[in-house]
Amino acid sequence: MKDVPALTNLLLDEFSVFRDLEIEEYQSIATAVDQRTYQDGEALFEAGELSRELYGIINGRVEILRSDESGRDRRLAILEPHAVLGELGFVLGEPRTATVRAIERLDVWCLNGRMFDALAEAHSEAARNIESNIIRMMAQRLSDTNKQLIKLMEGREGDYHVDDDDDIEDQLMRRWTV
C-alpha cells in the first residue's frame, strides 16, 4: 500500500516539477504516482520504447545510454537523486531517445501520462503548473546544451574542444541528455 502522506511530502520538498501546487493537489498527484524499485543493471526504459512515463529519482543513480553507429552503448550522463527524467516521452509521446539503466539499487516515483491526463480533468490548474514546470526544466536543459555546443563549436580550451581523435558529434553524444 502506498504511503500517500510521505510521498506527498517527498514530492513537495524534493522535486521542483511539483512546485506551486496546493496541498490537496499534491495529495491528488501522490495518489497518481507509483513508487518503483530497480536493481543494479535493470532498465527503466529502452531507447525506441513508446512510453508516457515521467520519473523522479528518490534514491540511487541511473546512467543514460545511447548506442553509437557500431551498436556500442555509450554513457551520456549519470543522474542522481532529485533528477527528473523521461520528460520528452511524457510530453511529446514519442519513442524514448535513450536507454536509462540503474547503476545501483534505485527508488523512483513514476507518473504515467494517462494517469496525469485523468488527473488534469479534475485539477486543470495543477496540471498546467506541472506542465509549465516540465517545460521550464526542458528549457533549462536546452539552454545548458546550447552553451556547451557554442563552447564546443568555438573550439575553446578546457572541457570543450575538438581534436583529431574526437569529433564534434562524439563530444555532443557524451553531453547529450534524455
Image: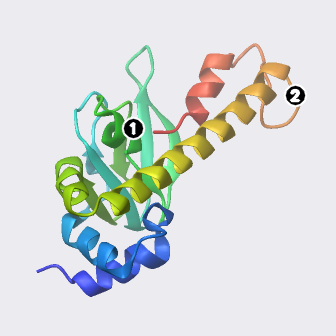
Residue 102 x %, y % = 35, 54
Answer left or right for 79 relative to 160: left
In this rendering, is residue 178 above or below 166? below
Answer left or right for 32 relative to 91: left
Q: Secondary structure at mark 1?
A: helix
Answer left or right for 151 relative to 24: right
Nearest to the observer: residue 41 or residue 38: 38
State the image quarter where residue 141 is shown.
top right
Answer left or right for 77 relative to 32: right
Graded by Cα atoms within 10 Å as few (under 14), some (14 to 19) or many (20 or more), the crowding at tag 1 reads many
Mark 1 or mark 2: which comes first in sequence? 1
**Residue positioned 28% across, 36% down in the render:** 46
Q: Amino acid at mark 1?
A: Leu
Q: CA distance from mark 1 to mark 2?
A: 30 Å
**Residue positioned 45% across, 20% down in the render:** 68
Nearest to the observer: residue 161 or residue 18: 18
Nearest to the observer: residue 91 or residue 98: 91
In this rendering, is residue 95 above or below 115? above
Residue 134 x %, y % = 46, 50
Residue holding disc 2: 156
Image quarter in which the C terminus is found? top left
**Residue positioned 58% across, 41% down in the render:** 139
Graded by Cα atoms within 10 Å as few (under 14), some (14 to 19) or many (20 or more), the crowding at tag 2 reads few
Residue holding disc 1: 88
Q: Amino acid at mark 2?
A: Arg
Nearest to the observer: residue 60 or residue 124: 124
Question: Given this view, does label 1 or label 2 mark the residue nearer the observer?
Answer: 1
**Residue positioned 68% across, 18% down in the render:** 168
Residue 147 x %, y % = 74, 35
